[in-house]
Amino acid sequence: MSQVFDLAIIGGGVNGCGIARDAAGRGNSVFLCEMNDLASGTSSVSTKLVHGGLRYLEYYEFHLVREALIEREILWRIAPHIIRPLRFVLPHHAGLRSTWLLRLGLFLYDHIGGRKLLPPTRSVDLARDEVGKPLTPGRYRKGFEYSDCFVDDARLVVLTARDAAGRGADIRTRTRAVETRQADGLWHVTVEDTLSGEHSTIAARVLVNAGGPWVEQVLGLGAGVNTRARVRLVQGSHIVVRKLYDHDRAYIFQNSDGRIVFAIPYQDDFTLIGTTDRDYDGDPAKVKATDEEIAYLCASVSEYLAKPVKPEDVVWTYAGVRPLYDDGASEAKAATREYAFELDTPGGVPLLSVYGGKITTHRRLAEEALEKLSPYLKGTKAREGWTAKAPLPGGDMNVSAVAALTADLLRCYPFLTLAHANRLAHAYGTRAAKVLGAAKSMADLGRGFGGTLTEREVRYLISDEWACTAEDVVWRRSKLGLRMSSADIAALDEWIATQRITARPKQNAGARP
């Protein structure tokens, strides 16, 4: 209690970490607690896209699409190692949206967001172009190809938190908020370390509720607020199958129910298919892809592909709950993806609750949150807009430099395979050399756990990126679980448990690029 933080944040997803980064960079003292791992909820189970949301144009969400399209290239510039351009093929399906409607939508998509680096839309003859080869012969003849970006969502959250910590933020994972109360003009937040069971209390001038699907539960911890906003929980599930085609483009398929489904090249050897939209009523921590959803996704892509996808082809599934702002839409697919804030001052002490949002707009959401809190915080205007230019850790390079970085790693560490060096370059960017250190051979990297994962890398993830378990390592900070056996993962968990390494990275542990 000796320190009073300017800002306390509950929730370690992309919104909470984004606010922590921006606030710390403006000179505020920041405390953030997350009851599980960073990005362990909604933020690691997305469709892995930084995009404007083409289909939202149908719901006249022009402001949301424009803001997201602007953010798309900003995020690519500050994190080119974990974000990359991706071309999407949209086949024309006779009987669904007309060709002129698709052309109009893509024209708007190309022009309302200030696109500068990404290539524009083009028409595609699916009977002749290579992108038509995986499709059912003779059924789809016309199509369009447009640009968006792919993102490693969980790494985006972790690197955002890493940068916040490097700027002084106190980031606490496995730390559950159990009570919030007001006293002496401050928020007093009691937290429980879920690993040790120990309780402690911190004080802050401002409290931010970025609980995501748990935003209303956080309000129930004693905030004394009767919120007017409501959260709408919408389940989105994804499946992963073996690589469906050889080219590097993604597909966006229209369904007769009005929804769209993506098929995206994933982790070199796989294809990611998603997502679903269905209202969810239950514990967000227990959500999982249902047999019905798996069958729906398989049927959706099989409508277009020459070789059908079957449920038995699925090698991995994941599901999450999107905490959307409840705007009263009749169907989950039509619910707004705009974010909203509720600023309350019970007892004169400010509390900001965050509703909705998407990965693509998290940086702007953080800026708007701090704009609303500016009367209560110091320095909120001093560096306004700085996050649009400052690279995330490892991202201090040109957007086209990842291939050159891979080549540099191979020169400096000739014992690496091309696949290993490429994975490290995309995961860590210019910090990959810090992961590898002075190693002269694979033996210097310590024990191998499978899938090119080494002891040196795991130690780095624990000391610098808050990893505590094998799940943190192989399913969030990497996706190596797709290449490792269950025995490999169990062995990694056992090894981590024997090391007794704390997952409390130092605040100044080389976070700034």
Image (tube, rainbow, N blue to C red):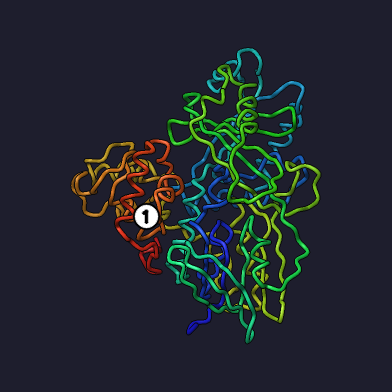
Q: Position of residue 338 (x, y in %)?
A: 70, 53
Assign a secondary structure to mark 1. helix
Q: Is residue 10 visible?
A: yes
Q: Residue at x 44, y 36 (%)?
A: 267
| Amino acid type, label 1 | Leu
Q: Position of residue 376 (x, y in %)?
A: 64, 78
Q: Residue at x 45, y 72 (%)?
A: 168
Q: Quadrant of residue 190?
A: bottom right
Instruction: Give the number of marks.
Output: 1
Q: Residues within 10 Å of mark 1 (few under 14, many from 20)?
A: some
Q: Residue furthest top?
A: 138
Tell me: 307 left or right of 458.
Answer: right
Q: Residue furthest bottom?
A: 184
Considering only vertical position in the picture, is 127 above or below 401? above
- Identify the image quadrant of the C terminus: bottom left
Q: Residue at x 62, y 73 (%)?
A: 180
Tell me: 348 left or right of 421.
Answer: right
Q: Position of residue 265 (x, y in %)?
A: 50, 33
213 or 383: nearer the eye?
213
Considering only vertical position in the picture, is 282 above or below 220? above
Q: Quadrant of residue 213?
A: bottom right
Tell me: 491 left or right of 22.
Answer: left
Determine which residue is flagged by label 1.
461
Q: Is residue 120 visible?
A: no
Q: Position of residue 403 (x, y in %)?
A: 37, 41
Considering only vertical position in the picture, is 46 above or below 353? above
241 or 87: nearer the eye?
241
143 or 219: nearer the eye?
219
